[in-house]
Amino acid sequence: MKAVQFVACIVLLVFSGVLVRADIAKPKTTPQENKSLYTSMEVIPDAKATDARLQIRQSTLNDLRAALNGEPGNAVLASTITRSGTRTIIAGLLMFLSVSFGGVWLVRAFRSGQGLRRTEKIAAIALIAVATFGAAAIITRGNAGPPPTYRWRNLPTALAGGQSTYGPVILEIVPDDPNSSIGMKLTIPLKKQKPNGEDE
Amino acid sequence: MQEAVELNLTTLVVNKPVEQGKRVFVAALFVCAITSAALAGLLPLQVSIVTVFLFAGPHNWFELRYFITRLPVRFGRSRAFFMTAFIGVASLTVAYISLPFLYRTTGWSYEASLTAIALWNTLLLAWLTTLVFLRSKQKPRSDGTWVMPIAFALCAFNWLAPDLFGLMLVYVHPLIALWFLDRHLQRNRPHWVRAYRRSLLLVPLSVGLLVWQLWSTDSLAEDNGLFWRITQHSGAELLPQVSSHLLVSVHLFLEMLHYFVWLLALPLLGPFLIGRKARQNLLARFWELDSLPIARHPRGFPKTVAAMLLVGLAVVLLLWVGFSIDYATTRDVYFTVAIAHVIAEAPFLMKMLQVQ
């Protein structure tokens, strides 16, 4: 009898312990941050295509690898400049003209025997500041890119009209989901529009 | 001789109040800068909405009035300069306003829209360069060639990142008002210039403080269209690695200083002389048309000027009504049309600068 009472007490104690533990808040697990990379994407509807195709540039893949390995990516200056060949060529020509005119102006200023006047000094400082600011801005721009909804807002219309749409996208590596067999998922930030064109 | 005596007398009469006024002016600058920075840092979205509602329209009206003040009765040798300025302001404004319409109707790609923005920015820079050349021609022994390398460098930057160039204009434009005030003080309160320039150190200090405090803050919620518009206007889309709280706060701080200059400093600190007579009241009265040379002159246009100012007043009232009915849409319309006043500041500032 005593043994039964002892066992009953032990069982009660264990259950009470379980009940007490049940009231304790579950320890907070810090969610592991998904690896992500800012880049851009173009969605092209193609009537002749037989398969949906996802094309990734080698440099983007390299950056993705770097992000996965926890290394800093290098998709800064180069990717921004090579985004548009035409604009890069124009910018290069203009920079060439800037340096040429700047050189001629400096030579003329010194040949006149007066050296640089106050306005010219300010202009020289401004030129250096603009160059520095421009370089800094380009580097900053190179790191840019979360998905602004605005770029994607015309996607349905463009798809219906067979036109391409270009916008920023985040490449994100997510943990495996045992309940889903889908390999990739694309989320487009589309807001429903009112009849007057306003976003809801 | 008589004029010199009059000027000396004026200087003697106004000297004491001017010194007292300098202290008040510097104190007002301090209070304004600190209050603006505090409000912009603490409640960026709310204060932005209220500030634009209250001051956007009136500050444009005061700018219009100030520009009219600076207009000569006859253009004379400045005819080419002013014609280029007016044609440029009109055509660039029309082109800027038509860009969003073209974007919507033609279905441009992102790249094409960037090219269109880059083209507009290039035209703006070309126009500014032309104005500098025309201005330098008016001054003997002046050489405007220094502007060429700067203009080309800016153009190059613009073609690399047109949207960033536009964002740069958004942040630089409020600072132009401080430059206007500097030139204005040099003409009308030369003894104040030193104190003013020293107090300008508050601007980078305040911006530095905002950056320090808000750098690691969370971005602002964009849970409605209006908040989204405000953050986009400050460059949240272009600079995603920077907290939108910081961007909106810095932009709002600069905008508030801009409004302070146009609504208080410039209208109140009018010239001591009206024509050749000393002003009776040291604080300028903005409703007095006799302080406008183009209206006061016997060959001037007082009725046209009065009509322009009245129309401007009606637009301000209309803007307030618009903000009350549909704030977000009116804000969009305002910031698109307001490019006209941004562009118009350039020729008037150039006229106030001494080109060497």
Image (spheres, rainbow, N blue to C red):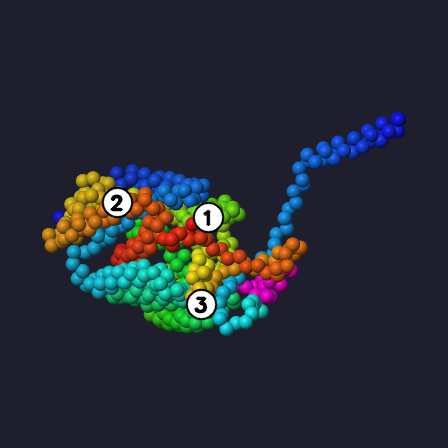
Q: Is A74 contained in the magenta span?
A: yes
Question: Disc 2 and disc 1: Cα gap in Å?
Answer: 29 Å
Instruction: Give the crowd class for mark 1: few <14, some 14-19, many >=20 residues within 10 Å.
Output: some
Above or below — where is A74 with respect to B319? below
Determine if residue A106 is in view: no
Chain to which mark 2 belongs: B
Question: Residue B222: which disc?
Answer: 1
The residue at the point 32 percent across, 44 percent down is B325
Direction left: furthest residue: B298
Instruction: Using the image as rendered, state which of residue A90 and residue B9 is in the foreground.
Output: A90
Upstream in the sequence, badge 2 or badge 1?
A: 1
Q: In the image, which residues are magenta?
A: A59-77
Badge 1 amino acid: Glu
Disc 2 is placed on an element classified as helix
Mark 3 sits on what residue? A162
Badge 3 amino acid: Gly
The residue mark sitting in front, 3 or 2, is 3
Badge 2 amino acid: Leu
- Relative placement, left or right, of B6 versus B351 is left
Disc 1 is placed on an element classified as loop
